[in-house]
Image (cartoon, rainbow, N blue to C red):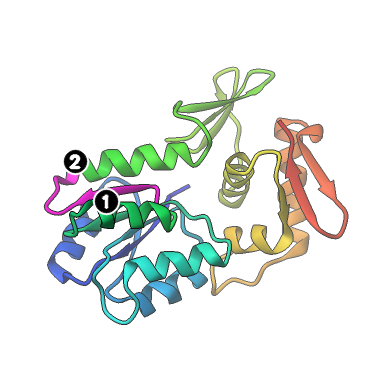
Amino acid sequence: MTSHILLLEDDIQLSDTIKQFLELKGYEVHTAYDGLEAEEIAYEKHLDLMLLDVKVPHINGFDFLKQLRDEGKEIPAIFITSLNSVEDVEKGFALGCDDYIRKPFALKELLVRVESLLKRSFGTHEERVVLGDGLLFDIKELALTQDGKKIGLKTKEIKLLSLFLQHADTLLEYKTINEALWEYDEKPSAGALRTYIKRLRAAIGREKIETVKNIGYRFVT
């Protein structure tokens, strides 16, 4: 499963450079040149990470992140900005960013920070999550294996398992799951979701996914 990244940067040349670099590394990058465009993408797409410039038109990066955090959206965020005062850094972290990188920066450094933060979003710095009974989930490859043999899962089933691992022991409501699994131009299907849950239970153990009637599901560690 490809990780989706929102890039909010109004410098078109820099935006194109970052987008091309990250896409060569296997990421899906959604670009926005102002805060309103970023807002639209954030509500339409399932995002795994955000790269946010601060000085952008309409809604600046600080206000954009504050708005998302106030609404309960915990998408990991890295500020990429020319602002370099201690106060600006403190403000960024106070608003809920996860990392901060100053311009100019090397693309390799950006990649390291992106990969590190995506791993942390699974609650681990390891490349793999151990699920027991010989089961391993490879975070980088987004593949589930048992005793070294790959278990065939569909894209949305892998995406669902990733979501559960990122929010282990947390009740995920149907709305949250639907927003993560289906793109804005797709219609969520309760029947399909039940099928994905059934297949995941068959792969990792029925007891690991708890049904909370009429609300959602919880991945139990």
Instruction: Give SS at disc 2.
Output: helix
What's the residue at 46%, 37% (across, down)? 120
User: Disc 1 designates what residue?
Assistant: 22
Query: Where does the image place residue 176, in percent across and percent down from the top left?
Result: 65, 60
Asked whether 151 or 17 is in front, the reply is 17
- Residue 9, above or below 137: below
- Residue 141, above or below 71: above
Q: Is residue 6 left or right of residue 142?
A: left
Query: Where does the image place residue 62, in percent across and percent down from the top left?
Result: 35, 66
User: Disc 2 designates what residue?
Assistant: 108
Look at discs 2 and 1 and give the one toward the viewer: 2
Give the amino acid type for the residue marked by disc 1 in the picture: Leu
Give the amino acid type for the residue marked by disc 2 in the picture: Lys
Say few, some or many: other residues with alpha carbon within 10 Å of mark 2 (under 14 / 14 to 19 / 20 or more). Answer: few
| Residue 28 showing in the rendered view | no
Whole-number angstrom distance, CA of label 2 to CA of label 1: 10 Å
Nearer-N-terminus badge (2/1) = 1
**Range drawn in magenta:** 97-107
Residue 178, quarter of the rendered image: bottom right
Query: Where does the image place residue 113, in percent across and percent down from the top left?
Result: 30, 41
Instruction: Give SS at disc 1.
Output: helix
- Residue 206, above or below 126: below
What's the residue at 18%, 54% (across, down)? 84
Say few, some or many: other residues with alpha carbon within 10 Å of mark 1 (under 14 / 14 to 19 / 20 or more). Answer: some
